[in-house]
Amino acid sequence: MPRDRVRCLECREPIPSDARICPHCESLQPSPLVDAGIVVAGVFALVFGVILALLTVGTSKLFGFTLLIVGFGLAVGGYTRRVDRRVERRSR
């Protein structure tokens, strides 16, 4: 299989690496931009949650802590998802 081709996640047929829809089974292939967007949203939520948690009181402080936890989960989860997909593509 040439370097610019990967296998479809559903039918495992070789497809172009930039294809977002498999020409064989028409399944949607994951986009690396989605992973980057999740990480950026997570970092933004993390930073905004820290600011709210440190500078406010009451319900806003609770919202800040919640946002901090969600942001951390999104940032770490999005990054590990990106790394997992990169390793999976290399192993094909």
Image (tube, rainbow, N blue to C red):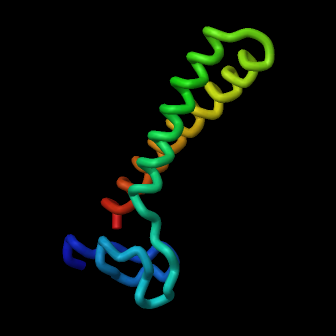
Instruction: List x then y, in percent, for residue 85.
Output: 42, 56
Compared to residue 89, the image places residue 20 above or below, namely below
Q: Horizontally, is 71 left or right of 88 in the view?
A: right
Compared to residue 28, the image places residue 45 above or below, namely above
Compared to residue 64, the image places residue 37 above or below, namely below
Residue 76 appears in the figure: no
Q: At x 49% / y 86%, what residue is drawn? A: 26
Q: Horizontally, is 60 left or right of 92 in the view?
A: right
Direction right: furthest residue: 59
Viewer-nearest residue: 19 or 52 = 52
Instruction: List x then y, in percent, for residue 88.
Output: 40, 59
Report the label total. Answer: 0
Q: Quadrant of residue 65?
A: top right
Q: At x 53% / y 36%, what residue is drawn? A: 42
Q: Quadrant of residue 61?
A: top right
Viewer-nearest residue: 86 or 41 = 41
Q: At x 57% / y 18%, what residue is drawn? A: 50
Compared to residue 63, the image places residue 74 above or below, namely below
Instruction: List x then y, in percent, for residue 52.
Output: 63, 18
User: Split into 4 quadrants, where in the image is the N terminus?
Assistant: bottom left
User: Split into 4 quadrants, where in the image is the C terminus?
Assistant: bottom left
Instruction: List x then y, in percent, for residue 13.
Output: 40, 84
